[in-house]
Structure formats: C-alpha cells, structure tokens
Amino acid sequence: MIEVWDIGNTHTRIALWDGGEFIDLRRFPAGEIPDITGNFHRVAACVNPAVRAKLPECGIKFITAADKNLPVDFSLVDTSTLGADRVANAVAAATLYPLPAVVIDCGTALTMEVIDDRKCFAGGAIAPGRILLRKALATGTAQLPDIPLTPEMPEEIGRNTVGAIRFGVDAGIVGTIRQWLEVVQKKYPDLHLILTGGDAGFLAPQFPDAIVVDEYFTLHGIRIAGEKIIENL
C-alpha cells in the first residue's frame, strides 16, 4: 500500500492506495499533525512549509516537478517555483483524461494548469479563491464584513453590502475562469476542461462542458508521481 498525503493551505488529506482504489480518506486542519502509524510507502504534495516543518522523520517522499520519469514534461516552466499541488494536477490530467486539458482547481487559491497533447505542461495561472477574496475585503477595509460562502451562485447584482460582495466575488470568479479559458483556447481549441477542488461543484453549472472530478483527483496525481519516485529508489 501507499499512503498519499495532500498537504494544503487550509487542510491536510491522507488516504491509502491499495493498488486499485483509495481507502480510509482522512482530513485534518492544516495546523494539526496526524499520528503516523503503519509501515507504508508515503508520498506527499505540500504547499504549506509550516506544516512540513512540523512533520517528524517518517520517510515521506515529497513530489516535485524535478522528479525523474514523471508522465508530464515540465521543461517549459520554472520548476523551482511550481507548487506540488499543481504538479499533481498536471500528472493526474495527463494520465487519466484526454488531452489537451486544462485543470481549474477551485480551492483556497484558484489555479489553472494547462497540459498539451504531448503531455507537456504549458503553464497556467494563480488567483485568490472565494474564501481569500472575502477575507481580503474584510481585512483590507474598515467596514466590509467577512461573509460566509453560500452554495448558490447569485443571480442578481447586490442590493446591500453582503449581496454586493457575494455577486462581486462569486460572479467575479466565474468571469476570471472564462477569461483564462478564452486566452488558452486560442492556442488549444479542443481543450478539455477539468474542474476540481472544494468549489468545483459550485462552479460546475456555469461550465456545463466541464469534467467535474471527484475529491481523489489530486491524490491520484500525487500517487502516480509517487509511484515513479518509489520505482527509482
């Protein structure tokens, strides 16, 4: 078995890969370090250095774009600054879905990964997600509140401050993604859109042609990259 870790900005997810499927998925707040038990190979993607620094020596192998024999060519980009979560998304898309593809990961950050039909990582984009945009308004102004997420897309412009924030942020996220896709589709007109992350379900109705993947998508990318690392040991 392989124990797969996805260490993100707001939480850590851990699941076991038994060779055919993921089992025993667990989720922890980002600051909480889970007990590490069992004699498994462990592979991880980490975008939270503070959490990584707290981990005990337990043989976790952290994936990077510089790892050998990955199923994606990262030679077009600066691999020293490419987040491991984005590496995992590119690997999952290139291995499990038709190409060319674009992955929109809708989490704490909103990210885009473009993989061409030669399995080459062509680049992407990073922006704040819905939570970060709300927090930025609340912390960067004197009177705007930090409002909770809602499951429905606002259909009209706001008639009060809360409504204006919801429409501005939530509809604005959709506009951001549409602009990204407009640019990318000029070069890759046959692009397959993959939506993942916590807000994928929220955004899916706005992109009816998208492939909405389950919560194991990024874990699959970590697992596939990790298997290549283990093969080279």
Image (cartoon, rainbow, N blue to C red):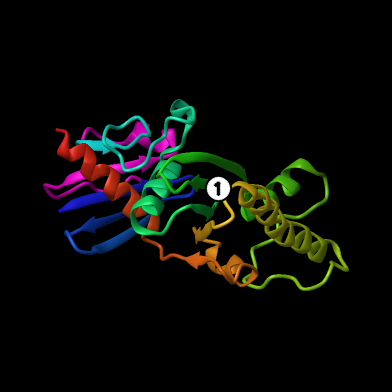
Q: Is residue 90 visible?
A: yes
The residue depicted at 37 percent of the width and 52 percent of the height is: 92
Q: Quadrant of the N terminus?
A: bottom left
Q: Report whether 172 appears left or right of 64.
A: right
Q: Report whether 63 appears left or right of 80.
A: left
Report x, y in % for residue 125: 59, 42
Task: Give the answer, above or below, for where 44 lies relative to 219.
Answer: above
Amino acid under label 1?
Met
* Residue range (magenta): 31-58
Residue 57 lies in magenta, yes or no?
A: yes
Tell me the crowding category of disc 1: few under 14, some 14 to 19, or many 20 or more residues within 10 angstroms, Cα based: many
Q: Which residue is mark 1?
A: 112
Residue 38 lies in magenta, yes or no?
A: yes
Report x, y in % for residue 12: 39, 50
Q: Nearer the viewer, residue 106 or 206?
A: 206
The residue depicted at 49 percent of the width and 30 percent of the height is: 77
Report x, y in % for residue 163: 80, 66
Q: Is residue 34 visible?
A: no
Quadrant for residue 189, please give it: bottom right
The residue depicted at 41 percent of the width and 59 percent of the height is: 98
Q: Nearer the viewer, residue 184 or 217?
A: 184
Q: Nearer the viewer, residue 215 or 55?
A: 215
The residue depicted at 44 percent of the width and 29 percent of the height is: 79
Q: Nearer the viewer, residue 226 or 128?
A: 226
Quadrant for residue 158, please give it: bottom right
Q: Quadrant of the C terminus?
A: top left
